[in-house]
Amino acid sequence: MMDDRSLKEYLMLYLLENEEGLKVNVLSDKRMIKFKPIRVVRKRRTTVLKVLDVLKELRKEGRIKRFKKYGRLVYVELPKKALSPVIAIMLLFVIVTLLATILYITICGIVSMIVLTPVSYEYESICIDSAKLSSDGTFVIIVRNTGDVKATVDTIYLLDYLTSNLVARAELFYVNGNQYDKIAVEPNSVVEIHGTFGVTVWGTFTIKVVTLTGVEASVITIVRS
């Protein structure tokens, strides 16, 4: 099987090269296409699940807008094409003119004071080291703070893997036997979080951990019946 990066580039190239032939509606302005992932599976010796994972990565990178799986087909919307060279040059000219004007005003002393705001290089970041989800909805998640500031876990979501629809959410957690509605994780520290989504589950899901500031980390887990 090929590595993730090679599969990603192959899949993106496949979509772009076959865009006209795969387009859903040739009269529409939207770049909506459809394809059978099994063709990629056979060609590149991979799996349908891996193809869907790669599509999710392409969506996060902004190389595709969104995708949806219907039966054996996957519908993918590509982003709009870039501006034409003529428009791009015109925009560049406007920006350069604006910057020159600002520089002129500054040099002439109309702007008498420039207040410099200190830049903070501290950032918040978390990752999920491991996650275990049981069929009764209980979970154990190990969260690591990979940033430079304290991160506070606020909510944990359970999403359907294929549709990304919300299945359940947990807002009460247990750490070392104690109950919390929010959990602070210091930089370079890990915490083992126990809890329950309160629903019976089976299949493939995405567990998403979100902090008070909106920073998030996700992991895919499978619950077998």
Image (spheres, rainbow, N blue to C red):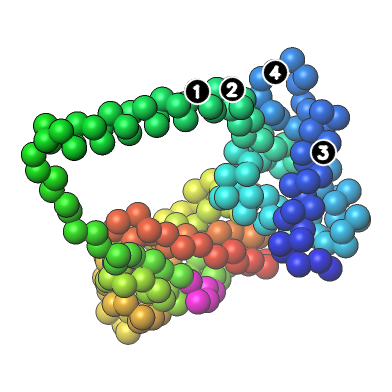
Q: Which residue is mark 3?
A: 17
Name the residue located 64 percent from the left edge and 30 percent from the top edge. 81
Q: Which residues are magenta?
A: 128-132
Q: Which mark is residue 220?
A: none
Residue 139 position in % (x across, y down):
48, 71
Q: Which residue is mark 4?
A: 28
Name the residue located 76 percent from the left edge and 21 percent from the top edge. 25
- Decide: marks 1, 3 in contact (CB < 8 A)? no
Q: Is residue 28 above or below residue 70?
A: above
Q: Nearer the viewer, mark 3 or mark 2?
A: 2
In the image, 71 versus 153, the foreground residue is 153
Q: Which residue is mark 2?
A: 86
Mark 2 and mark 4: Cα distance apart in space: 24 Å
Q: Which mark is residue 90?
A: 1
Instruction: Please tell me whether residue 218 belongs to the stretch shown in magenta.
Output: no
Which image quadrant: the C terminus?
A: bottom right
- Decide: marks 1, 2 in contact (CB < 8 A)? yes
* Residue count near mark 4 (Cα–Cα under 10 Å), binned few <14, some 14–19, many ≥20: few
Mark 1 and mark 3: Cα distance apart in space: 30 Å
